C-alpha cells in the first residue's frame, strides 16, 4: 500500500515520465543529450547521458519493438500443445512468458493473445464467460498448506477436475526456492496426470509474485485446467497481490494463537473469503475449536468484501481429510453465488486494471530508482531520513529534484 507521500510523488513521477524520451516510442534521445556526453566533464553527467541512451524507447516493453510472424513456429507448437492439454508444453510456455529476452517476450505475447482469443471463442460457444475457478491460498509457514493442497487437489482430480497449482513464495528469490520441500509434501498430486504443479519463479517482485503470474493463470486455463490454486506464504506482501488475481481467497491457519500467529497480518483476515482452521484432529481438536470461535467473532467486525458474501470459518484436517469436502462445498457455493450475480466477472475485469497499474507502477519506480542522479544521492538522503535530520517528504523532494535536473 502506498502512503500518502508516496502516492503524491508517484503522481509527480508519472507526469515527469510521460514526457521522458525513454518512455516515448516515437522520440529518441535528442542529439544535444548525446553531445552533452562528449563534453561532460564529470563522470556523473556522463553516466546520466549514457543511462538515457541505454534506455531506448520501448524499454520495459521490448516486445513492442520486436516483430514476429503471426505463424511463428514456436508459438504454433506451444499453442497446439496447450490446446491438447499437454503439461510439458504448458511448462515450456510458462518459461517462455517468464523470459526477459525481447524476441521471446514477443512470442509470449502472441501466444497469450491466441490463448485469450480461443477462450473468448469458447465463451461465445458455451455461453459461459467464466469456466475456471481461481483460488488463492495463504497461511503462515507450517500451517499445512502443502498437505492441504495434496488432499484437496487429489479430491478435485478424482471428481474430474484438472488442477493447476502455482506456488508464489516470497522467500524463493532469496533462498533459491522451496519447491523441493513442497513437492515431497505433494507426492501423489505431482504424479497425477490431471494436476500440474508449477514452482515459484526464481526472480520475484511484489514479494514473490512476478508480473507474469496473471499470464500464467491464463495459460493454465488455456491448457484446460479449470481450477487454479495459487499458494503463497502469509508473509510479505505477496498475499495481497495474490488476492488481486483470484476469485476466492482462502486463509489457512493452524490451531495456534498469539505468538505463533504473529506472522499473519491483520489485513489478511479482512481480504479472506474463507478461513480454514487446519489440523483439527487428535489432540489438536480442542485448540482448533477455540481458534474457530475466535476467528468467527473476529470476522464479525470486518467489512465484507462483497454484499453477497460474508467470510466463513471452517475447521478441517488436511491429514485425515475431515471437513475438506465441506470446505469445497462452501467454495462452490461462493463461486455459484458470485457467478449468478455477475460479481465474479466484475471482479476479474477490475483485477485486470489493478494489474495493469501494478506493472506501470513497478516500471516507473525502476526507472526512477536506477537513474544515476537518484542513485548518487540515495544513500545520503536515506541516512538523513533515518537519523531524523530530514523529513521523508523533503527527502522525496530532493530526490525528485535530482531526477528532474538530469533526466
Ligand atoms: N495433525 C496434523 N498435522 C498436519 C496437518 N496438515 C499438515 N500437518 C503437518 O504440519 C506440518 C507442516 O505442514 P506443511 O503442509 O508442510 O505446511 P506448509 O504450510 O506447506 O508449510 P511451509 O511450506 O513451510 O509454509 C507437517 O509436519 C504436516 O505433516 C493436519 O491436518 N493435521
Ligand atoms: Mg508448503
Image (tube, helix red, strand yellow):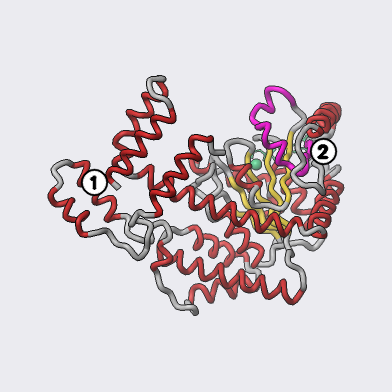
Which range of residues does the magenta coloring cover? 257-278
Looking at the image, residue 4 sits to the left or right of residue 145; the answer is left
- Residue 86 is a magenta residue: no
Identified at 29% across, 40% down, the residue is 373
Residue 243 in sight from this viewpoint: yes
Label 1: which secondary element: helix
x and y, in percent, of residue 335 in the image: 79, 55
x and y, in percent, of residue 301 in the image: 78, 32
Looking at the image, residue 42 sits to the left or right of residue 359; the answer is left
User: Label 1 near label 2: C-beta < 8 Å?
Assistant: no
Q: What residue did someone put label 1 on?
A: 47
Between the C-alphas of marks 2 and 1, the distance is 56 Å
- Residue 275 is a magenta residue: yes
| Mark identifier at residue 235 | none
Q: Quadrant of ligand 2?
A: top right
- Callout 2: CB less than 8 Å from ligand 1: no
Q: Is residue 263 above or below residue 212?
A: above
Looking at the image, residue 130 sits to the left or right of residue 405; the answer is right
x and y, in percent, of residue 262 in the image: 66, 26
Identified at 81% across, 42% down, the residue is 310
Q: Is residue 255 above or below residue 345?
A: above
Q: Give the quarter of the image for residue 191.
A: bottom right
Identified at 16% across, 41% down, the residue is 42
Q: What residue did someone put label 2 on?
A: 313
Q: Is residue 95 above or below residue 251?
A: below
Residue toward you, 143 or 350:
350
Residue toward you, 9 or 141:
9
Q: Callout 2: 10 Å neighbours few (<14), some, many (20+)?
A: many
Judged from this view, the residue extending furthest toward the bottom is: 71
Amino acid at each position: 500500500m502506498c502512503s500518502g507521500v508516496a502516492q503524491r510523488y508517484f503522481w509527480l513521477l508519472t507526469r515527469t515520465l510521460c514526457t521522458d524520451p525513454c518512455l516515448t516510442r516515437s522520440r529518441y534521445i535528442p542529439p544535444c543529450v548525446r553531445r552533452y556526453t562528449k563534453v561532460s566533464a564529470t563522470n556523473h553527467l556522463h553516466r546520466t547521458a549514457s543511462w538515457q541512451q541505454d534506455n531506448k524507447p520501448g524499454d520495459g516493453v521490448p516486445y513492442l519493438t520486436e516483430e514476429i510472424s503471426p505463424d511463428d513456429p514456436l508459438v504454433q507448437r506451444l499453442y497446439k500443445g496447450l490446446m491438447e492439454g499437454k503439461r510439458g508444453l504448458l511448462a515450456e510456455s510458462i518459461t517462455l512468458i517468464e523470459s526477459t529476452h525481447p524476441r521471446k517476450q514477443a512470442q509470449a505475447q502472441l501466444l497469450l493473445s491466441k490463448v485469450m482469443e480461443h477462450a473468448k471463442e469458447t465463451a461465445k460457444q458455451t455461453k459461459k464467460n467464466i469456466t475456471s475457478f481461481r483460488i488463492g491460498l495463504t497461511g503462515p509457514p507450517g500451517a499445512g498448506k502443502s498437505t492441504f493442497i495434496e488432499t484437496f487437489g487429489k479430491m478435485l482430480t478424482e471428481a474430474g477436475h484438472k488442477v493447476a497449482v502455482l506456488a508464489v513464495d516470497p522467500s524463493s528469490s532469496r533462498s533459491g526456492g522451496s519447491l523441493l520441500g513442497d513437492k515431497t509434501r505433494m507426492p501423489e498430486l505431482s504424479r497425477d496426470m490431471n494436476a500440474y504443479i508449477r514452482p515459484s519463479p526464481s526472480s520475484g517482485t511484489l514479494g514473490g509474485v512476478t508480473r507474469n503470474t496473471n499470464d500464467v493463470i491464463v495459460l493454465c486455463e488455456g491448457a484446460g485446467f479449470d481450477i487454479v490454486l495459487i499458494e503463497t506464504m502469509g508473509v510479505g506482501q505477496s498475499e495481497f497481490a495474490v488476492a488481486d488475481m483470484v476469485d476466492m481467497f482462502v486463509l489457512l491457519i493452524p490451531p495456534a494463537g498469539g505468538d505463533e500467529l504473529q506472522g499473519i497480518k491483520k489485513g489478511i483476515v479482512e481480504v479472506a473469503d474463507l478461513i480454514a482452521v487446519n489440523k483439527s484432529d487428535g489432540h489438536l481438536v480442542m485448540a482448533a475449536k477455540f481458534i474457530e470461535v475466535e476467528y468467527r467473532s473476529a470476522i464479525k467486525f470486518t467489512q465484507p468484501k462483497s454484499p453477497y458474501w460474508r467470510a466463513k470459518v471452517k475447521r478441517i484436517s488436511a491429514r485425515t481429510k475431515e471437513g475438506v469436502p465441506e470446505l469445497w462445498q462452501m467454495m462452490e457455493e461462493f463461486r455459484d453465488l458470485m457467478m449468478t450475480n455477475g460479481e465474479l466477472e466484475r471482479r476479474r475485469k477490475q483485477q485486470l486494471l489493478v494489474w495493469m497499474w501494478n506493472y506501470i507502477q513497478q516500471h516507473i519506480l525502476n526507472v526512477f530508482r536506477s537513474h544515476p542522479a537518484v542513485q548518487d544521492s540515495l544513500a545520503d538522503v536515506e541516512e538523513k531520513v533515518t537519523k531524523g535530520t530530514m523529513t521523508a517528504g523533503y527527502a522525496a523532494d530532493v530526490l525528485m529534484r535530482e531526477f528532474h535536473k538530469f533526466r
